Amino acid sequence: MKIHYIQHVKFETLGTIAQWIEKKGHSLLSTHLYADESFPSMDNFDLLIIMGGPMNIYEYEKYPWLIEEKQFIEKTIYAGKAVLGICLGAQLVADVLKAEVFKNNYAEIGWFPVFTLKQDSSKLSFLENIPEKFTAFHWHGDTFNLPGDAKRIFLSEACKNQGFIYNDRVIGLQFHLEMSNETIENAIENCSDELVDGKYIQNEKGMLSKYTLLADSRLLMFKLLDNLEKMIES
C-alpha cells in the first residue's frame, strides 16, 4: 500500500504510525507544509494521513497553504481515496465535508477516556477489536460538528464528537493514539502557553511518564490501522 502524509509543523510527526508502516512494509512519502512542499498526484498514494498542528483551520493569512490543502483533501476524498485525519487533520476533513469547526466548550489536553459508539456503528469493520472505553491523549481547543452522512464513532466527556467515519473510507479522529513521550514533550515545549487552569487540562507532570498508557495507545493505533488497511484492500 502507498501512504502519503501531511505534516503541518516540525514537531507534530507520525509518531508510532511510522512504526506500523515500517512493520507492514508499506511505502511512505510526505508533504511538509511548513517547508512549502507540494502535494502529490492522486496516482501516488492509496491512503492519505493528515496530522495535527496548533493552527486554526481558518488562519489563512498566517498559513496560506491551508487553502490549497483543503482543496487537495477535497480532491482526495472525491477521488475515492482513503483518508485518516488526526486532530487538526480531522477538523480539516470535517470542514471540507461542510461541517462547522468551532471552539469547544472545554480545551482538552492530557490523558482522558474515550468511548466507542459500537451500538451506533456495530457493522463497521473499522471498529473491530476496539474496546468500548480506552484512555487516549488529547490536545485540542476546537471541535467539529458531524459531517452529513458521517457516523459518529467516538466521544469523550469533554467533547461529543471525538471521531467519525464517512463513506467507509474517510476517518477523522480528534484524539491522539500515535503519541510517545518524545512527541508529548515536543507538544509541551511548543504549546506550553495552552497549559492553563481548566477542567480537562493536565499539567506537564500529569502528561508525561504514562508508559502503560503509551503502550496501550500504540497497540490500539495499530489495531485501527490494521482495520483501515483491510477496508482499503477489500
Image (cartoon, rainbow, N blue to C red):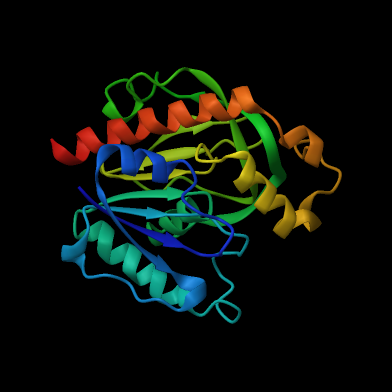
Determine whether 221 is above or below 89 in the image: above
In the rendered view, does 62 fall on the left or right side of 66?
right
Residue 34 percent location from the top left of the image: 52, 73
In front: 12, or 84?
Answer: 12
Residue 88 lies, with reference to residue 175, above or below; the image says below
Residue at 53%, 55% in the rendered image: 88
Residue 150 appears in view: no
Q: Give 120 or 26, whichever is nearer the viewer.
A: 26
Viewer-side residue, 204 vs 160: 204
Q: Residue at x 58, y 39 (%)?
A: 180
Identify the residue at the far left of this view. 234
Residue at figure coordinates x 27%, y 22% from the top left: 123
121 shown above or below 74? above
The extreme right residue here reads 197
Spot occupied by residue 50 in the image (x, y as percentages of width and height): 42, 56
Residue at the spot 53% in from the left edge and 49% down from the top edge: 87
**Label tally:** 0
Instruction: Indicate the quadrant where residue 227 lies.
Output: top left
In the rendered image, residue 140, in percent from the top left (x then y), is placed at 64, 49
